[in-house]
Image (cartoon, rainbow, N blue to C red):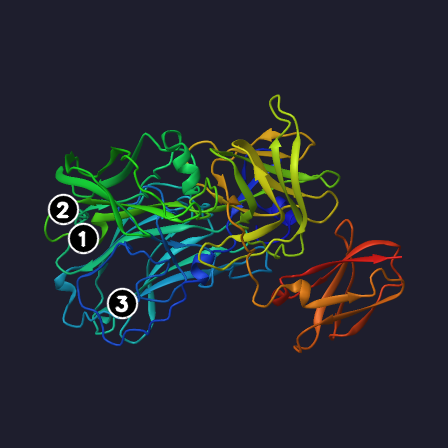
Amino acid sequence: MRVTFLLLFSAICYLRLSAQEQVVPLDHNPALSQSLLKTPLKTTALNLPFFEDFSGTGATPDQGKWIGASVYINNTMSFNPPSRGVATFDALNALGGPYDSSSANALVYADSLTSQPIDISGFSKADSLYLSFFYQPQGNGFAPEKQDSLILYFKRATGGWIKVWSDTGSLVKPFRQVMIPVLDSFYFHNSFQFRFVNKASINLNDDVWNIDYIRLDAGRAVSDTAVNDLAATQEPSFLLNDYTSMPYRQFIANPTFELAAQHYFTVRNNYPVTQNIDYGYSAVERESNTPLFTAPAGTAAIPGYSSQQFQFPVFPVSFTAPGPYAKVVFEQQYCISTPAGEPKANDTIRKQQVFDNYLAYDDGTAERSYFLNQFATLPAKTAIEFHLNEPDTIRGVAIYFGRQVPLASGKFFSVAVYKDIAFNGGTEQLLYQQDLLFPSYADSVNHYWVYKFDTAIAMGAGTFYLGTIQPAASGSDSLYIGLDVNRVGGNHLYFNVLNFWESSLVSGALMVRPVLGAPIFGTPVSDPPEESRWSVYPNPAHDRVQITWDDRNGRRMLEVSDALGRGVLRTELESGGSLDVSGLSPGIYFVRILDRAFGYAVKKLIVQ
């Protein structure tokens, strides 16, 4: 994942689905890059008890309890956690990028999670202080290997850190609780801290560890493993049957078909004995704050150390959108009643059912990346099946690209829309193809890069397919696209690497979304559109071309590639500089400015 495909193929044992489809770990997490800490560090030490179950809604740790931002707080990377929200340790730094982008076998200290100072100066060994936590390797990511580890340190009064616990990598397993006593006198000071660190094989996989439910308190014993908490755990289901999101006008055209028969949320009883609870939910339309439904309260008895799923029939939908292209958000709030004295933040969990201008099978979070193992002489294609309940207009596509080392910004691809594909008796019916697109990485709230089609496509009700094409012999193979492994149900994905279509064997949803309805803008770059900002003249050319751009930021790197994507020239130029193309054979070439400010812009050049 971290280096070229050939090195990856020889060095890594991937999760192999077929000879052509590959699933690899994430190499970037844009949620972290958009959640850098802006709050100041605490100056006053915390007091006991210390408790954290990561039930907040942000992607970074609560700065009232923690220092640093390298771990990822989420509710999608773990499997069957004790309560909703975990801290995920991997090989990605606080900016969401890899710690090392060059070494193929680096083994380094990666993520860390350090508590704020805690005043335990008034305690001693006799007070029986214990730190407990739950941990899980792999979860929904990739497993840490045997040389990888998760480590816990305690801080001495003199400032040194002492290793008190560790575990080596292994395949996924249930969350396991660890009890660590605080025994030595040099820990009992007014700025005690503890720190979790994972040691990761940077370029082999993303070495996922999940931590949950951390407690530090006095008066405990090694047998004090009962959590005594009822908690919402895994993400609730979507209201829709198959899509995770769609335009409201498409939904309301056939709500009976689109709605799931039921929706649900999950509660775990972490007590050692059966607990009786009340539970229920309410729903509002979030954009207008319009109440939609309140369910009657239910009761249940949940045995100790077990989870129970609570199911509800879908409520009748009578909401009227303010316009045909309006965004509509149904938000369900699921709640449980719990005994006094236990944590309350994890008693409520919310789920938004978004109706917007796109169709999606994914939930917006990538746990892994997907790519096709392409043959040099054949194009590699994907096609995802979608359906419309009424005629609509396809305006573009939104794609979540998985980061690669090196970045795939130099690779190009096409987007294709089909009425049908030649699979299982179908016939190939290509409706539209847009070429010479380059992958980009949107560190924005939704993390997708939006490509606006040059021509809007009027599409009737029924099925269509949308996907990517990577040209043959272009150097554009192994293009990573985000994969949501939490997808429930079929993935609707087909691929073509041997000149015929096959049904995908991947479990999960490829993060590619058709954008529908009103006119759209593509994902903007930091400056005005590149077409008006630089020029290549003369074009066609015989021996030299002048390249000019409209800023004064000095020299920029340029690359010229042939029609197959092979680089033939690379040089630095000042604006207005002259490029010698006399050594190139007559034909079509592509000139690129290798600069993010220009969106890695491309212009076609004809050499005569």
Q: Quadrant of residue 151?
A: bottom left
Q: Which residue is mark 1?
A: 344
Q: Which residue is mark 3?
A: 64
Identity, as a three-letter code, of the amino acid under mark 3: Gly
Q: Write the residue at 60% across / 41% down.
A: 457
Q: Is residue 486 visible?
A: no
Q: Nearer the viewer, residue 156 or 524?
A: 524
Q: Sort mark 1 into few (<14), some (14-19) or many (20+) by Cα contacts within 10 Å.
A: some
Q: Nearer the viewer, residue 216 or 521?
A: 521
Identity, as a three-letter code, of the amino acid under mark 2: Thr
Q: Write the residue at 65% across / 40% down.
A: 432
Q: In the rendered view of the protein, which quadrant contains the C terminus?
A: bottom right
Q: Which residue is mark 2?
A: 338
Q: Earlier in the sequence, mark 1 or mark 2?
A: 2
Q: Are marks 3 and 1 in contact (CB under 8 Å)?
A: no
Q: Position of residue 140 (x, y in %)?
A: 41, 43
Q: Quadrant of residue 271?
A: top left
- Element at badge 1? loop
